[in-house]
Amino acid sequence: MKFISYLCLIYTLLTISIASEVPNTSYLYTPEPNEEKSKFVSLEQSISNKVFEIEKLHARIVPYNRSMRKEITIDNHITPFTRHKHETIRYEKETVLIFSANKLTKVKIISRKRFLNDNTKFLNKKFIFVYPDYDYSSLAVDNLDGHSLQYLKFFSEKNKLEALQKVDQNLQESIYKLEVLLLKYQKRRSSREKQKLDI
C-alpha cells in the first residue's frame, strides 16, 4: 500500500514538473479583427479625405463665383430618353454640395426617373448625406405610391456600408468635376487678362 502511494506521489511530481516546462502561449492569441468594422473605419477615413479635398477646391472656386459660396450643384448624369420594358425613360442625376462657414456639411445625391409615355409616372430619390454626423443622413423616395423617408442609423450594417460606399464614390466624382470647373474659371480669367494686355 505504501508502495502504491509512493508511485502516485512520483507521478504527481512528474506531472507538475512537465506542466511547468510547457510555455504559456495564451498571450500570443489575438482575436480576429472585425472585418465589417475595419471596412467602416477605412471608408470613413476615405470620406473625410475627400471632404477635405472638396473644401480646398471650394475655397479656390468661390473667388471666381461668389454664388457658389454656400452651394454647388453638379450634374452627374443625364441620359436621353431610352426604351425599357416598352416604356421610354429618362434618367437624371445630380449632386448638391452644401457648405456652411466654408465647411462641407451636406451632400445631396438626387436621382430622377421620367416616363415619357406617362407624365404621371415618376420615381425620385434623394439621399442627404450629413457630415460628419452620418446617422442623421436620410434617404427619401417619391413615386406614385407615395413618399418614404428612412434615416441611415436605421439601416442594416450591410446597407449602411453600401450607402457610404456610394457617397465615397460620389465625392470622388465631385472632386473631378470641381477640378474641371476650377480649370475652366482659371482659363477664362487668363484669357481676359491677355485681352487687357493687348495694347
Image (cartoon, helix red, strand yellow):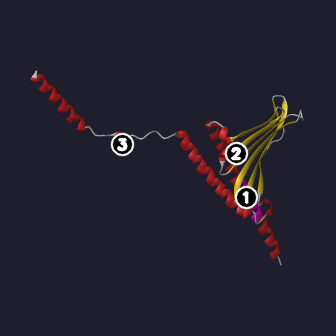
Pick whichever, 96 or 199, lies toward us: 96
Q: Gap between marks 3 and 1, in whole Å?
A: 50 Å
Q: Where are the magenta residues, as a range?
A: 176-186
Badge 1, how many Cα within 10 Å: few under 14, some, many 20+?
few
- The residue under label 3 is 27
Q: CA distance from mark 2 to mark 1?
A: 17 Å
Residue hosting label 2: 137
Secondary structure, mark 1, is strand
What percent of the width, then of the height, locates residue 87?
A: 84, 31
| Residue 162 is at least partly visible in this image | no
Amino acid bearing label 1: Ser
Q: In the rendered image, which residue does mark 1 sit on?
A: 100
Q: Is residue 1 left or right of residue 75?
A: left
Question: In terms of image quadrants, where is residue 79?
Answer: top right
In this view, 180 is above or below 19:
below
Q: Residue at the location (57% across, 47% down)?
A: 42
User: Is 184 in the magenta?
Assistant: yes
Q: Which mark is first along the chain, 1 or 2?
A: 1
Q: Earlier in the sequence, mark 3 or mark 2?
A: 3
Dot 3 lies on which element?
helix
Q: Compare residues 50 and 193 and report the one nearer the observer.
A: 50
Give the image quarter of residue 135: top right
Query: Which numbered marker is on residue 29?
Result: none
Gap between marks 3 and 2 measured at Cα: 42 Å
Q: Callout 3, which amino acid?
A: Tyr
Q: Closest to the observer: 15 or 56? A: 15
Q: Is residue 45 above or below residue 68?
A: above
Say which residue appears at 19% left-offset and 30% top-offset: 12
Coordinates of residue 190 in the picture (x, y in percent): 77, 69
